[in-house]
Image: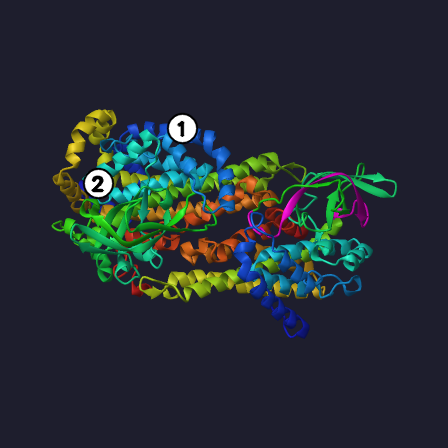
């Protein structure tokens, strides 16, 4: 990611990369053993103390107010080493973003003011799905001034550790769906064990069953899809920043290995087919970094057609990441497939990043349908 | 139009007819009985998947996540009960004698359920291929009969294939790299046998195997001319198991480190060494190359059938999901884009299958198992009772003449064109089918979205498992170079492969 000449962003760039190298890289394999090993709570707490979860939140709501560009820079650096923490940051930032779109600033401020720990501050959300596409699992019934939520919802990221969850639900007789904020400490919230997943093991998700849980409506009733689309149009670039970070990490690890390893009596970096593999990785990685940087600038400046540009950039980066991380393993042969290195984790994590904000093919169709 | 002589001449032009029409040639030359055998083993594999793999594979994978040191003895014992470890061993060695040509479809079936379980069965046959490639009939007979006995007694006796070393993956697989590479497993000739020092890594099912077909070298500077193949039994003094690798996928098929420290292997367990390959028309280096080519021709077709299995497993999971899941108010399977993705996945499976079958046909007609597929020998073997084989073959296998004549046929009578064809098709099938496997696994994840990342939905395991197929038995890049070497290079005078010219 390119922080350009902005001193503040440069500082954030350096500090987040330093954090990733010191706090994430050394414990990557151990942290990835969750849920069969301990959760890396101390690292999450440290990220909270360093305001990594506050980056996207406006200053008047207790955040840092750096916006999408800063968020992408930090996500990019974090994901170079371990995207589980990136997943936690993304989920929280998406929930915040959606609530901002819905005008739920007061609630966000309250959460921010009260939170003394990461758990209290973080907001869980089912960020791997686009609620409008699938049958709604939750329904909301009006109870005087309040709403009560019932039903089941799958794969609520951070649902097992956050204080609140932002959940979609339909209301009887109403078109569309709405978003609700739920206090996850409510005894009527039944959480499953942590879902055992493909990657991002330390960015845990749970399935949740609600049995008449009191919930606050976020924004206006029936406008859930509108808020989701608005938040997603920006946050898809944050997902791309994560993918670009994973690609960069994969390339760095592959280059480091190829500079040391010999086969056939030669350094493997000297074999031209190996160079071709690395070249394809490097080209895709550099393009990804540039696209995310440019998309961030377009969003920040509200350029004409920024949504189209950001959407195209995000789809390209997220799609191309799968090839790069696969080649990242390939370039290291059998070693790349083992947990001793970071390549296999990047391969798995990329599967999650692709699924952020819904099915990848549907995101592509959404993109073109806007142009048709 | 054309004379007989002209036909021969034209068909020898590139691409050679025999190289590109393996299946057509097989139609007439292969015994028809193979079709029935293939149907039978496919049905057996489907039943095994239905009764065992489908319900256990994901539980086992989760168990391996929890405890990477777990050894899947339960699977090995189950496969042993089903007779899988002797299924494709020739009857002359006490096996069930199903045609080796039927093994590909069998592996595809098991692999479509779980590649790790398929490997727990299939890797034993890689060990068998290593063993058989020595043509040491006495030891082949002895070890195979231990496997048969293990089946009878319920104590599985598996073989591992120990070639890869910590600093020598590709170096150990290609004769061109053996002398300049970093091979380090040294076998020193001493009175009465060899003393081995070195380490082997990534040895599939090492910890679960009784016999280890070990590749070592008496001269590490000229390894290509001094390869020694040894049979080492678990428990041999100086041989121990090292760590188990922590892999991304195929977890139940453990990847072992084998450590040899002053390990003495007696002469009667030497499968092949330089002294045994003197006097053949091919040089020691050429025989090493031939042995490796025969091994890879068979084993890479095997990996290709795994790749096809994984592609099919991914397709089946995606299809099941799309048939049950509603998106935008209708079943996913009724979205045109999804139908096209599923059709592409179906195509990928078919392409993988065609590729491994073509390699299979090449091996059956021109490869190391050519003799077994000759119609008279095939039918004689098929309809002769094991008891008769035992009476005739057991004593014959003990004769040094039997080993000599077998090697004479294998090492001297196999033509260069046949080596090129079988080894080339092994590589072509391997990288084609395993690429299809990874492609389909990724497509399944795309179709399944959030559900795809959940372990219990199975697609994510298939994706993890599929990636390894592009790496072992030579990375797909190495296999591409091998296809050029074996099937393309001869049409380009001056071209060289696996050499410094390629840097």
**Mark 1 element type:** helix
Chain letter for mark 1? B
Q: List the residue tagged with mark 2.
A: B139
Residue B303's place in the image compared with B167, above or below, is above
Q: List the residue tagged with mark 1.
A: B43
Location of the N terminus of chain A (image quadrant): bottom right
Residue B306's place in the image compared with A352, above or below, is above
- Seen from the viewer's position, the closer of residues B9 and A321 is A321
10 Å crowding of disc 2: few (<14), some (14-19), many (20+): many
**What separation in Å lies between label 1 and label 2 (alpha carbons)?**
32 Å
Of discs 1 and 2, which sits in the foreground?
2
Q: Position of residue A102 (x, y in %)?
A: 79, 53
Left or right of A238, for residue B394: left
- Seen from the viewer's position, the closer of residues B271 and B71 is B71
Q: Position of residue B106 (x, y in %)?
A: 38, 34
**Disc number at residue B254?**
none
10 Å crowding of disc 1: few (<14), some (14-19), many (20+): some
Q: Position of residue A295 (x, y in %)?
A: 64, 63
Q: Position of residue B120 (x, y in %)?
A: 39, 40
Chain letter for mark 2? B
- Seen from the viewer's position, the closer of residues B474 and A187 is A187
The reply to whether residue B370 is in sight is no
**Mark 2 element type:** helix
Q: Are marks 1 and 2 in contact (CB under 8 Å)?
A: no
Residue A29 colored in magenta in the image: no
Q: Quadrant of residue A264?
A: bottom left
Residue B273's place in the image compared with B348, above or below, is below
Region rendered in magenta? A198-225
Q: Residue furthest front?
A: B237
């Amino acid at each position: 990611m390119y922080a350009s000449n902005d001193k503040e962003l440069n500082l954030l760039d350096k500090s987040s990369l330093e954090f990733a190298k010191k706090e994430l890289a050394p414990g990557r394999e151990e942290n990835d053993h969750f849920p069969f090993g301990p959760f890396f709570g101390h690292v999450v707490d440290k990220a909270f103390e360093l305001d990594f979860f506050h980056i996207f939140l406006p200053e008047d709501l207790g955040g840092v107010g750096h916006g999408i560009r800063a968020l992408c820079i930090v996500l990019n650096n974090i994901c170079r080493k371990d995207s589980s923490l990136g997943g936690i940051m993304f989920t929280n930032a998406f929930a915040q973003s959606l609530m901002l779109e819905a005008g739920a600033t007061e609630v966000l401020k309250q959460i921010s003011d009260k939170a003394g720990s990461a758990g209290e501050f973080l907001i869980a959300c089912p960020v791997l799905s686009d609620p409008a596409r699938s049958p709604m699992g939750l329904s909301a019934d009006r109870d005087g001034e309040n709403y009560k939520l019932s039903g089941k919802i799958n794969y609520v990221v951070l649902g097992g550790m956050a204080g609140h969850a932002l959940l979609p639900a339909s209301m009887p007789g109403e078109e569309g769906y709405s978003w609700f904020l739920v206090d996850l400490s409510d005894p009527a919230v039944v959480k499953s064990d942590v879902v055992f997943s493909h990657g991002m093991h330390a960015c845990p998700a749970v399935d949740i069953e609600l049995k008449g849980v009191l919930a606050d409506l976020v924004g206006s009733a029936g406008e859930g899809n509108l808020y989701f689309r608005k938040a997603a149009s920006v946050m898809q670039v944050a997902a791309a920043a994560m993918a670009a970070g994973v690609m960069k990490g994969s390339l760095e690890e592959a280059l480091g290995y190829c500079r040391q390893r010999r086969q056939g009596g030669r350094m493997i970096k000297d074999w031209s087919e190996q160079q071709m593999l690395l070249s394809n990785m490097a080209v895709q990685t550099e393009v990804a970094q540039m696209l995310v940087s440019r998309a961030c600038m377009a969003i920040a400046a509200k350029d004409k057609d920024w949504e189209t540009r950001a959407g195209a950039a995000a789809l390209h980066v997220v799609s191309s990441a799968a090839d790069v991380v696969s080649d990242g393993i390939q370039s290291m042969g059998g070693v790349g497939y083992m947990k001793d290195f970071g390549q296999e984790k990047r391969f798995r994590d990329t599967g999650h990043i692709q699924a952020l904000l819904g099915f990848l093919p549907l995101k592509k169709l959404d993109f073109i349908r806007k142009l048709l | 139009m054309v004379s007989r002589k002209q036909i021969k001449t034209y068909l020898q032009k590139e691409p050679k007819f025999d190289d590109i029409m393996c299946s057509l040639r097989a139609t007439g030359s292969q015994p028809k009985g193979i079709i029935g055998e293939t149907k039978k083993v496919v049905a057996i594999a489907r039943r095994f998947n239905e009764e065992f793999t489908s319900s256990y594979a994901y539980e086992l994978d989760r168990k391996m996540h929890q405890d990477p040191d777990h050894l899947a003895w339960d699977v090995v014992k189950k496969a042993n009960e089903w007779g899988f470890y002797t299924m494709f061993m020739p009857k002359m060695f006490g096996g069930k004698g199903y045609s080796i040509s039927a093994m590909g479809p069998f592996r595809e079936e098991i692999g479509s359920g779980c590649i790790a379980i398929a490997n727990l069965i299939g890797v034993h046959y890689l060990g068998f291929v290593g063993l058989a490639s020595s043509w040491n009939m006495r030891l082949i007979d002895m070890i195979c009969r231990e496997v048969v006995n293990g089946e009878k007694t319920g104590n599985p006796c598996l073989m591992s294939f120990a070639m890869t070393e910590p600093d020598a993956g590709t170096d150990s697989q290609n004769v061109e790299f053996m002398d300049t590479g970093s091979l380090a497993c040294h076998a020193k000739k001493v009175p009465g046998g060899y003393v081995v020092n070195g380490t082997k890594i990534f040895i599939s099912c090492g910890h679960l195997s009784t016999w280890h077909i070990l590749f070592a070298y008496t001269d590490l500077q000229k390894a290509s001319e001094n390869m020694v193949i040894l049979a080492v039994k678990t428990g041999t003094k100086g041989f121990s198991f090292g760590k188990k690798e922590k892999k991304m996928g195929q977890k139940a098929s453990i990847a072992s480190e084998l450590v040899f420290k002053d390990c003495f292997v007696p002469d009667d367990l030497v499968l092949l060494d330089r002294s045994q390959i003197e006097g053949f028309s091919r040089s020691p280096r050429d025989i090493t190359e031939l042995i490796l080519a025969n091994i890879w021709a068979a084993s890479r077709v095997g990996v290709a059938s795994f790749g096809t299995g994984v592609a099919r497993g991914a397709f089946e999971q995606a299809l099941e999901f799309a048939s049950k899941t509603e998106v935008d108010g209708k079943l996913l399977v009724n979205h045109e884009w999804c139908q096209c993705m599923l059709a592409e996945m179906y195509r990928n499976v078919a392409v993988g299958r065609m590729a491994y079958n073509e390699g299979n046909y090449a091996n059956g007609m021109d490869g190391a198992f050519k003799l077994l597929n000759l119609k008279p020998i095939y039918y004689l073997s098929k309809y002769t009772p094991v008891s008769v084989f035992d009476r005739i073959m057991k004593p014959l296998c003990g004769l040094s003449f039997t080993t000599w004549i077998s090697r004479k046929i294998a090492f001297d009578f196999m033509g260069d064109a046949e080596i090129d064809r079988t080894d080339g098709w092994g590589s072509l099938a391997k990288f084609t089918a395993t690429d299809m496997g990874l492609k389909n696994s990724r497509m399944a994840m795309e179709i399944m979205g959030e559900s795809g990342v959940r372990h219990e939905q199975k697609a994510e395991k298939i994706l993890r498992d599929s990636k390894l197929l592009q790496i072992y038995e030579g990375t797909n890049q190495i296999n591409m170079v091998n296809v050029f070497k074996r099937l393309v290079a001869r049409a380009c005078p001056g071209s060289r492969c696996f050499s410094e010219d390629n840097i």
